Image: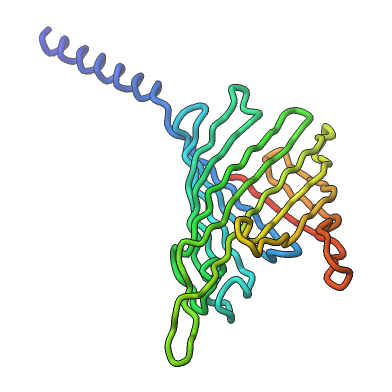
C-alpha cells in the first residue's frame, strides 16, 4: 500500500508540473525582412526582430544594410551600417503600435572623414504604425547625429575633419484598404541636413501616392512615386522621386 501511495504522489506531482508548464506563456518571436530602393538612398535591405515581453510590449532589434557606395570608402568597403534596439508599445486592440528605438551608425557618412569607423554616430528614432480594418498609416522620425570626428589628410599627416554631418529624417503616410489585397494612399518624406547648424539645407521633400499589395500571410510590396517639392533653382530642380519596398514577415 505504501508503494501505491508513493506512486500516486509521483503521478500527482507530475500532473501539476505539466499543468504549470502549460499555463506558462512562451515568448513570441517575429522577424521582418524588407528590401528597399529609392531615388536617393539606393538599395538598402533592413531586418527587424521582436520578442514579446507581454501582450502589449515587445523588445525589438533592427538593422539597415546601406549599400550606396558614396556612403562608404568606395569600392564596396566601409559601407554605412546601422544597428539598434528599442520597444514596441501596443494599444489594447493592437491597431496602434508606438516604437521608440536607439541605433548606432558605423561608416564615414556622419564623421565626414576619409576612413570608415565604428560608432561614428547615433540615431534616436520614433515610429508609429496604425492598422485597422480599413485604414493604415505610419509616422517615422529619426535624428542622425555624429558622435566622432573623421580623419582627413593634411599634408603628410591626418587631422580631425572640421565639419561633421547630421540629418533629420521623417515621413508620414496614410492609406485606405480596399477590402482585398490592395491599399492606396499618400506619402510625404523630408530629409534635411545639419538642421541645427548655419549651413542647414533640404536634401529633398517628397510627396506622392502609393499602391500596396499585401498577401494574407503579411508579405507584400509598395511602390511610391511623385514630386520633389523642395524649392530649388531651375538648374538643380529634381524631376521627381520613386520608392519601392518589398517585405516578408516570419
Q: Determine which quarter of the picture holds residue 181.
A: top right
96 with respect to 232 (left or right): left
Provide residue 242's location: percent of width, then percent of height.
80, 59
205 with respect to 152 (left or right): right
Quarter of the figure that contains the N terminus = top left
Q: Please tell me which residue lies in front, 72 or 163.
A: 163
Residue found at the very far top of the displayed protein? 1
Residue found at the very far left of the displayed protein? 2
Q: Determine which quarter of the picture holds residue 94.
A: top right
For the point 72% across and 53% down, the residue is 190
Asked whether the viewer can see residue 78, the reply is no
Provide residue 118's location: percent of width, then percent of height.
44, 66
Asked whether the viewer can see residue 42, the reply is yes
Identify whether 37 is placed above or below 25: below
Quarter of the figure that contains the C terminus = top right
Provide residue 185's location: percent of width, then percent of height.
82, 42
Identify whether 122 is placed above or below 7: below
Q: Please tell me which residue lies in front, 198 or 210.
A: 198
Check the image and tell me how it is coloured: rainbow
Q: Please tell me which residue lies in front, 104 or 31.
A: 104
Identify whether 166 is placed above or below 125: below
Number of callouts: 0
For the point 49% across and 52% down, the residue is 84
Q: Please tell me which residue lies in front, 147 or 39.
A: 147
Provide residue 21's location: percent of width, then percent of height.
35, 25
143 with respect to 2 (left or right): right
For the point 57% across and 74% down, the residue is 72
Amino acid at each position: 500500500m505504501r508503494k501505491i501511495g508513493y506512486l500516486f504522489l509521483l503521478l500527482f506531482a507530475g500532473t501539476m508540473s505539466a499543468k504549470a508548464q502549460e499555463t506558462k506563456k512562451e515568448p513570441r518571436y517575429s522577424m521582418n525582412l524588407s528590401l528597399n530602393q529609392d531615388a536617393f538612398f539606393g538599395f538598402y535591405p533592413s531586418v527587424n526582430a521582436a520578442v514579446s515581453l507581454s501582450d502589449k510590449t515587445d523588445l525589438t532589434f533592427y538593422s539597415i544594410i546601406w549599400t550606396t557606395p558614396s556612403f562608404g570608402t568606395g569600392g564596396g568597403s566601409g559601407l554605412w551600417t546601422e544597428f539598434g534596439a528599442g520597444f514596441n508599445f501596443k494599444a489594447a486592440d493592437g491597431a496602434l503600435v508606438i516604437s521608440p528605438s536607439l541605433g548606432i551608425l558605423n561608416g564615414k557618412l556622419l564623421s565626414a572623414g576619409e576612413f570608415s569607423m565604428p560608432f561614428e554616430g547615433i540615431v534616436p528614432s520614433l515610429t508609429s504604425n496604425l492598422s485597422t480594418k480599413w485604414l493604415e498609416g505610419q509616422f517615422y522620425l529619426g535624428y542622425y547625429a555624429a558622435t566622432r570626428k573623421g580623419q582627413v589628410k593634411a599634408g603628410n599627416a591626418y587631422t580631425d575633419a572640421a565639419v561633421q554631418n547630421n540629418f533629420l529624417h521623417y515621413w508620414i503616410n496614410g492609406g485606405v484598404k480596399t477590402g482585398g489585397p490592395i491599399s492606396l494612399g499618400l506619402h510625404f518624406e523630408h530629409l534635411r541636413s545639419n538642421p541645427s547648424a548655419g549651413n542647414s539645407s533640404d536634401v529633398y521633400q517628397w510627396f506622392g501616392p502609393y499602391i500596396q499589395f499585401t498577401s494574407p500571410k503579411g508579405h507584400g510590396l509598395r511602390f511610391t512615386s511623385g514630386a520633389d517639392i523642395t524649392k530649388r533653382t531651375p538648374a538643380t530642380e529634381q524631376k521627381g522621386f520613386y520608392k519601392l519596398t518589398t517585405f516578408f514577415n516570419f
